[in-house]
Amino acid sequence: MQASDWFEAQFAYRFRRPELLETALTHSSAGSDHNERLEFIGDAVLNFVIAISVYERRPADHEGTLSRLRASLVKGSSLAALAAGLALGEQIALGPGELKSGGFQRRSILANTLEALLGAVYLDGGFEAAERCIHRLFADQLAALPDAATLMDSKTRLQEHLQARGLGLPVYELGQVSGRAHEQTFEVACIVAGLGLQGQGSGTSRQRAEQAAAGRVLEDIIAHKPG
């Protein structure tokens, strides 16, 4: 299937300037006329359209929740999953090195190319055309937006829980760090003195270990919650 036919089938849009579509599908490894500038435009348009969409669908949510909703939809992993569902990787022009290493499956390439496509639509057909494509792409996600609590990471949820109870903030203590420099594992303890709780977590970075430790404490709080 030609790229123009594939795109029309997926987005219900046909380019007036097919060269924009070709550029949007060209990775930087494949030539000088690549999609990075279109990606820049697409990222801005996507964020704006999704911001308006969540604002209209969640009239009672405050700014922080709206920001987390938008971020959950437009983050790289979410875009890569959408792109994979469209079989976008099969349409991307890659250089020999990226092609050999499986670049058509790489999440960053899929996400960036999807943004480039949206940027190309904006330049080709204007804002309303790009908005229609984005709404079509995110229809299922916008129809089933998650609850605010599920959008917070473990550290944020724990902090808000403790503040609501008038308790002090948790303390994170770094323990053992093992492994080679580029393959390290971090061990962290999350200590909540006001509740007499402590959770242990590990991860490939200190931040991930802290999140895991905070999650353990939250599990303990829920397990001992009355009722």
Image (cartoon, rainbow, N blue to C red):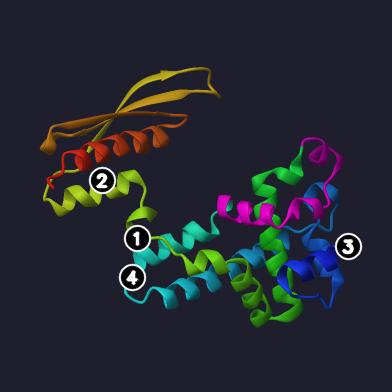
Indicate left or right for 32 with 142 as reference: right
Which disc, if any, is residue 97?
none
Asked whether the residues under the numbered discs 2 and 1 touch, taking CB atoms below 8 Å apart as contact, a structural biologist would say no
**Nearest to N terminus: mark 2 or mark 1:** 1
Q: CA distance from mark 4 to mark 3?
A: 43 Å
Which is nearer the eye, 205 or 102? Answer: 102
Dot 2 alpha-carbon crowd within 10 angstroms: few under 14, some 14 to 19, many 20 or more: many
Indicate left or right for 61 with 118 as reference: left
Which secondary structure, mark 3? loop
Which disc, if any, is residue 2?
3
- In the rendered view, would you say 35 is above or below 143? above
Which disc, if any, is residue 148?
1
Q: Is residue 126 magenta?
A: no
Q: Which residue is mark 2?
A: 158
The amino acid on which the numbered mark 1 sits, given as a three-letter code, is Ala
Q: Between label 2 and label 3, give the one nearer the viewer.
A: 3
Asked whether the residues under the numbered discs 4 and 1 touch, taking CB atoms below 8 Å apart as contact, a structural biologist would say yes
Which disc, if any, is residue 61?
4
x then y, percent, for residue 204 = 47, 29
The secondary structure making up most of the magenta span is helix
**Nearest to N terminus: mark 3 or mark 1:** 3
